[in-house]
């Protein structure tokens, strides 16, 4: 399943995220901003999990669950544009 | 390059907890690179801060309250005009529009232009008629009822679930959570603004406002949407961010086209958690945050002056999202002699 971040979401290296459609803004940590950058450029979730596994000493299943949680949160905030099976 | 000079009379220089747009409009005008503005404050109260901000407002005159009628207003404006030679007046209060529109031909004869909608257009978007206007133009609006007697509260209290918003005919709105509050505010608003009073369903969600400018021929000359980020207990935005969304711009375009709106306006909307957009109000003037729209690239007060003066203008097409305003209060220091002058002579 491919998930993509809305094209107009502004991301800054400092972790500040701005949605110009709603005016909502958020702060995320370095990992969060990396995930958002990947989602914005259309990188598959499976590849994001691989990246996180390389950088964090954690169980792959746990990383996958955390990423799903993060993406669900983005969906609630209406920051995801589409999903294709 | 020699700058041309234009003299503009401006109302709404107040800045209490519900600030008038006057000072913001003046800031927009002073951004001009080819027009040097002489700004004349037209004020009701002697403690409107704009009176004392001499770097923005060159001279101020007290004018009669709208309730004094057209003849009193014309007499006072004629006196001011003999001294100041105003090219136009930009009113910033809803309640003063009726008198000015009525006086429009006579003001033009003494050299004062206005760039305003007609009385029929004002009437259509008034708080008491907005429901009908919205329904006939496919705008979604919260359930609303006009009431003319306290007895009607019983009936509509059952039709609209609490919290219920109770609104005055011209200004003020309160959120009520029970019958006692509803009755209290009914009498308060009736005493201040008269009947009818409006009861409205309360919508939870984000508040979006759009500042816009119509040319009177159905064309949108400018439109900038903004999300309120910080809202006071009076419902006034104290911080906001300019946002992009074609849906909001389409609402502004549709409003201007449907009614052939002439002049500045503000549309107030609310988007609920389901994503549905509700029209709450349309104000027939620029909002107090209009300088943020200019900062985002659309200086609509300046464009309105150019149109009023008969100059060719090109409609704004884009703006910069992410521009923010954060309002603050500032203790402006003046001397009692200035207050004395405006209080005794009615001008400063």
Image (cartoon, coloured by chain):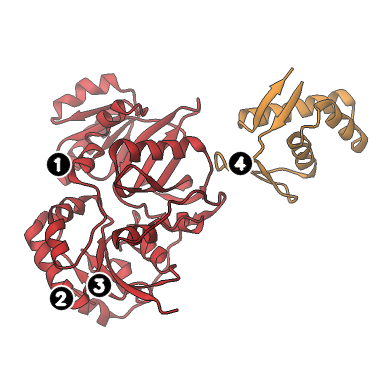
- Letter of the chain that mark 2 sits on in the rendering: B
Residue for point 89% across, 30% down = A50
The residue under label 4 is A19
Label 1 sits on residue: B194
Q: Position of residue B200 (x, y in %)?
A: 30, 30
Chain identifier matching the red colour in the rendered picture: B
- Element type where label 4 sits in the image: loop
- Res B15 seen here: no
In the visual, does B257 lie left or right of B321?
left
SS assignment at label 1: loop
Cα gap from disc 2 to disc 4, whole angstroms: 52 Å
Kindly report the distance in space between the C-alpha atoms of the residues bearing marks 4 and 1: 43 Å
**Residue B210 in view (yes/no):** yes
> Looking at the image, is mark 2 or mark 1 earlier in the sequence?
2
In which quarter of the view is residue B39 placed? bottom left
Q: Colour of chain A?
A: orange
Q: Nearer the viewer, mark 4 or mark 1?
A: 4
């Amino acid at each position: 399943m491919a998930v993509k971040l809305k094209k107009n979401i502004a991301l800054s290296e400092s972790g500040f995220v701005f949605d110009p459609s709603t005016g909502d803004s958020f702060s995320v940590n370095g990992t969060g901003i990396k995930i958002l950058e990947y989602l914005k450029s259309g990188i598959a979730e499976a590849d994001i999990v691989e990246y996180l596994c390389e950088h964090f000493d954690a169980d792959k299943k746990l990383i996958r669950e955390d990423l799903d949680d993060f993406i669900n949160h983005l969906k609630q905030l209406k920051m995801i544009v589409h999903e294709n099976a | 390059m020699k700058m041309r000079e234009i003299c503009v009379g401006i109302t709404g220089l107040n800045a209490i907890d519900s600030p008038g747009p006057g000072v913001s409009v003046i800031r927009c005008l002073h951004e001009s690179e080819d027009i040097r503005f002489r700004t004349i404050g037209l004020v009701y109260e002697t403690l409107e801060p704009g009176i004392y901000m001499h770097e923005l407002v060159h001279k101020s005159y007290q004018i009669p309250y709208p309730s004094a009628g057209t003849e009193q207003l014309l007499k006072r404006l004629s006196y001011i005009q003999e001294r100041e030679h105003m090219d136009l007046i930009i009113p910033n209060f809803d309640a003063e529009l009726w008198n000015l529109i009525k006086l429009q031909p006579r003001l033009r004869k003494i050299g004062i232009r206005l760039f305003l909608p007609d009385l029929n257009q004002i009437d259509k978007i008034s708080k008491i008629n907005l429901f009908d206007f919205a329904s006939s133009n496919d705008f979604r609006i919260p359930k609303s009822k006009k009431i003319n007697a306290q007895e009607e509260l019983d009936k509509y209290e059952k039709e609209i679930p609490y919290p219920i918003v109770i609104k005055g005919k011209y200004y003020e709105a309160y959120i009520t959570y029970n019958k006692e509050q509803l009755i209290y505010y009914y009498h308060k608003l009736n005493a201040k603004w008269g009947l009818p009073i409006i009861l409205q369903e309360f919508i939870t969600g984000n508040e979006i406002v759009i500042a816009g400018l119509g040319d009177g021929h159905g064309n949108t000359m400018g439109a900038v949407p903004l999300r309120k980020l910080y809202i006071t207990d009076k419902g006034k935005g104290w911080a906001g961010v300019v946002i992009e969304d074609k849906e909001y711009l389409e609402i502004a375009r549709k409003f201007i086209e449907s009614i052939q709106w002439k002049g500045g306006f503000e549309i107030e909307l609310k988007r609920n958690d389901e994503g549905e957009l509700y029209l709450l109000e349309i104000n027939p003037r620029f909002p107090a945050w209009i300088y943020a729209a200019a900062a985002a690239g659309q200086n609509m007060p300046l464009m309105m002056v150019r149109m009023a003066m008969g100059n060719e203008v090109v409609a704004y097409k884009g703006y910069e999202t992410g521009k923010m305003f954060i309002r603050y209060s500032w203790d402006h220091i003046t001397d009692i002699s200035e207050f004395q002058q405006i209080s005794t002579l009615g001008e400063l």
